[in-house]
Image (cartoon, helix red, strand yellow):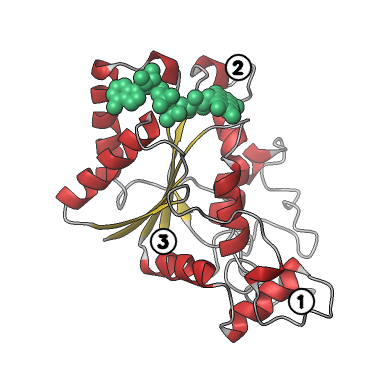
Amino acid sequence: MNVLMVYAHPEPQSLNGALKDFTVRHLEAAGHTVQVSDLYAMNWKAAIDGDDSPGRDRSAPFDPSRDSKRAYRDGTQAADIAREQEKLLWADTLILQFPLWWFSMPAILKGWVERVYACGFAYGVGEHSESRWGERYGEGNLKGKRAMLVVTAGGWDSHYGPRGINGPIDDLLFPIQHGVLYYPGFDVLPPFVVYRTGRMDEARFARTCDELGSRLDELWSARPIAFRQQNGGDYEIPSLTLKEEVAPQLTGFAAHLR
Ligand code: FAD
């Protein structure tokens, strides 16, 4: 299988660096092919702007969505964007690995998503009409592929529990897992989260690698998070609100799980 890891940490000798190296070694030893997009090492340009669509009409105002759609369609995107899209199409599974920074992904990784997820590639796919809102949330160009987050956090697991002060980890990761990954079609596996990173030592690191290794061994067999498909019959169209009879007692993120 082909695995793309998109990795965001500035320091190779960090905990994240060690976990990334472990993941690559483990997957390759199991016979898989791995590509790593090491965003800091690549000096990845995070800010989306007019340079991303080199052939655009510079007399017109820059429109991130319209210009990315045209550049994607015409094959005139910036080379770094096109290369990452090719890697995504090549991959059977995508791993996004990052430290939790301010309750989300580091800015450089957000910038990877914003630039690589061109209109027509990751969104704006399929028929858009009064009766259909495109192919997304379980459908789209990345359907059939799997994705998993590997996240490290300074906070304790209890801080991220159902009543923890930081909010439940599934809620914090919902915009990434449901929005960034499920939206363009990935089946999303439960995340691998390492909490309380300040308390890491060699023994705990070895245990963490064992647990991560087991999760990597199950990349192709684990059951994905049961998000509801947009076009699967649970939502009213075009309001895209859950039908009254679907999980009537639930609101918020939890309602979008089958
Ligand atoms: P490192 O700092 O590199 O290492 C952590 C520990 O692991 C160290 O003690 C190190 O000695 C040890 N270690 C490293 N490698 C090994 C190895 N190979 N074997 C054994 N031990 C090892 N946390 C939250 O919970 N929520 C937040 O919102 C949040 N926001 C943050 C925002 C910013 C800007 C920053 C800088 C931090 C934030 N944090 C937050 C904390 C952050 O999530 C953690 O610092 C980070 O996840 C730790 O990962 P690291 O790779 O940087 O670890």
Q: Position of residue 98 (x, y in %)?
A: 47, 39
Q: Residue furthest bottom?
A: 74
Residue type, numbered disc 1: Ser
Front label number (2 vs 1): 2
The residue labelled by disc 1 is 129
Residue at 49% over, 19% down:
157
Residue at 45% over, 69% down:
83
The residue labelled by disc 3 is 145
Q: Describe residue 219's horizontal placement relative to residue 45 as left or right.
A: left
* Vertical comparison of 132 with 173: above or below: below
Residue type, numbered disc 3: Lys
Residue type, numbered disc 2: Gly
**Judging from the image, what secondary structure is the residue with disc 1 in?**
loop
Pick whichever of labels 2 and 1 is earlier in the sequence: 1
The residue labelled by disc 2 is 164
Quadrant including the N terminus? bottom left
Marks 3/2: CA–CA distance: 32 Å
**Judging from the image, what secondary structure is the residue with disc 2 in?**
loop
Q: Can residue 232 be seen in this view?
A: no
- Crowdedness of circle 1 by 10 Å Cα count: few (<14), some, many (20+)? few
**Mark carried by residue 233:** none
Residue at 47% over, 47% down:
40
Q: Position of residue 236 (x, y in %)?
A: 75, 60
Pick whichever of labels 3 and 2 is earlier in the sequence: 3
On the image, which quarter does residue 121 sit in?
Answer: bottom right
Q: Position of residue 211 (x, y in %)?
A: 28, 30
On the image, which quarter does residue 198 sit in?
Answer: top left
